[in-house]
Amino acid sequence: MPLFATKPTQILSLCKKVASFHRMSTSTGEFLINDPKYSFLKDLGLKATNLGVYDGSWKGSGDSVQSICPSNGKVIAEVKQGTVDDYQSCVKASEEAWSVWAELPAPKRGEIVRQIGDALRNKLQPLGKLVSVEMGKILPEGVGEVQEYIDICDYAVGLSRTLAGAIYPSERPGHVLMEKWNPLGVIGVISAFNFPIAVYGWNSAIAMVCGDAVLWKGSETTPLVSVATTKIVSEVLERNHLPGAIATLCCGGADVGKAMAADPRIKLLSFTGSSAVGHNVGVEVQKRFGKHLLELGGNNALIVAEDADVDMVVQATVFACVGTAGQRCTTTRRLILHKSVHDEVLQRLKKAYEQVVHRIGDPLDDKTLIGPLHSPLSLQNYENTVTEIVKQGGRIEFGGKKIARDGYFVQPTIVTGLPHDSPLIHNECFAPIVYVLKTESVDEAIAWNNEVPQGLSSSIFTQSIGNIFKWIGPKGSDCGIVNVNIPTSGAEIGGAFGGEKHTGGGRESGSDAWKQYMRRATITINHSKELPLAQGIKFE
């Protein structure tokens, strides 16, 4: 069976191509890029038709894909995708560029990344608007996502001067035992539609200061973000007389992703997407004994203990559940309420939803708090899930309907009445649906938190020191992100981002995540005239 056969990313690709087919009669003059409202797109160097492959020069010999604005269903612009042959060209150019890049001292590489951060600052607003238009998240979130890339550039600059090795005591006289980290070579990044620039930034900024070249395949449904971002990065590299192929791009379909997974020249493959597709990617990479960094499904729970500050809970939960229209990896999917506060929190949450539901609309509008779902497929998944909830006896406390307007807008939805171990609850629907559960105790709530296959983010609201240390301890949350009195979403760049179990185990961004982009060498140097063996072995 092909690597991505019948998997979500391929279905999404098919859905996109179908949508494009129905619009092939649309003239380029009708594209949003030619509408004065969207003039900022041209400030990013975008055109009605764009090349989607960069290997030091721009090209593209694959199909043309039309990027659709999810808030109105109109074509923004189109991108000429890459083929597997184009991908091969990118890898070859990346390997050649790596030989130059790896020779630069790490602080010099850091200086280039600093300049990339500054170049992004200069394009912060138009690039943030592009994220909002193409992905569908509201403008503050679009700009905030670009800011994440800028922030990780700043972080990487400091890291470039602190990539530490180690010296350990040797048991042998006249010997030094050392540890040194070296770049891997060419790494691949396959990013998802929901964070079309930040995930690339987390990977590329760190990988670049580590001395790696980066080959990027962005989401098929956000190709304009990939093209605009690569233009900014490549201009910095070329301005410094460095090979542009240090940061290559190959927009393409599942065939390109499959080639990346199987290619031994890709020393590390970072993949963000569903657990189902991530499983296949991980297996394919492991077949060649390659390294992978998987950031997959979440299905995150927020626990509310009986002593929680309910005001804080309601405020935190609204954004955690409906922000980005429920399309964050860290969106709260399960709200586990202690029985003593269950009714109060549920009623207050419904009232809060009543306020925000009137602020659903165009992501570029300052008054909008919730944008659309990203695609027709996302909309279909939402509607199918709501139908199944009702069929299985769940109660729709709020929402549950598509909004009758252009684009892919839905009502944020609150569900009660399903058991904690319902297959529906254990299977993440990437939409603004939250399941509310009533629990007898914090211990029971922790067990429910941990019983799902995924393990990305989790949170508890409590004032009890005992609850806090139980929650963060060995028998507490089994997730990669374990929060207290803050929601499941909104991770900072300084910590390692990632999760356990079916979330994949990978870590990006801060802490020691940089080690994944390098290879460790243990080095023993004998500076004496003797040749003693370890462990006191005599071989005479």
Image (cartoon, rainbow, N blue to C red):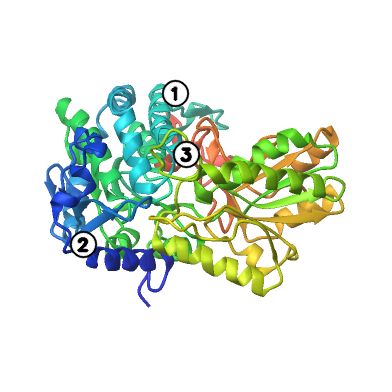
Please tell me how many numbered marks the rendered image carries. 3
Structural crowding at the residue carrying mark 3, measured as other residues with C-alpha within 10 Å and reported as few (<14), some (14–19) or many (≥20)? some
In the image, taking residue 404 as reference, residue 230 lies left or right, namely left
Res. 498 image quadrant: top right
- Residue type at the position of mark 2: Val
Q: CA distance from mark 1 to mark 2?
A: 38 Å
Q: CA distance from mark 3 to mark 1?
A: 42 Å
Q: Nearer the viewer, mark 3 or mark 2?
A: 3
The residue carrying mark 3 is 368
What residue do we see at 49% from left, 57% from top?
403
Q: CA distance from mark 3 to mark 2?
A: 40 Å
The residue carrying mark 1 is 162
Above or below residue 24? Residue 443 is: above
What residue do we see at 23% from left, 58% from top?
65
Secondary structure under the numbered disc 1 in the rendered image: loop
The residue carrying mark 2 is 84
- Viewer-proximal residue, 251 or 391? 391
Above or below residue 63? Residue 489 is: above
Secondary structure under the numbered disc 3 in the rendered image: loop
Residue 191, percent from left and from top:
38, 50
Above or below residue 231? Residue 380 is: below
Does the rendering let one see residue 78? Answer: yes
- Residue type at the position of mark 1: Thr
- Residue type at the position of mark 3: Thr
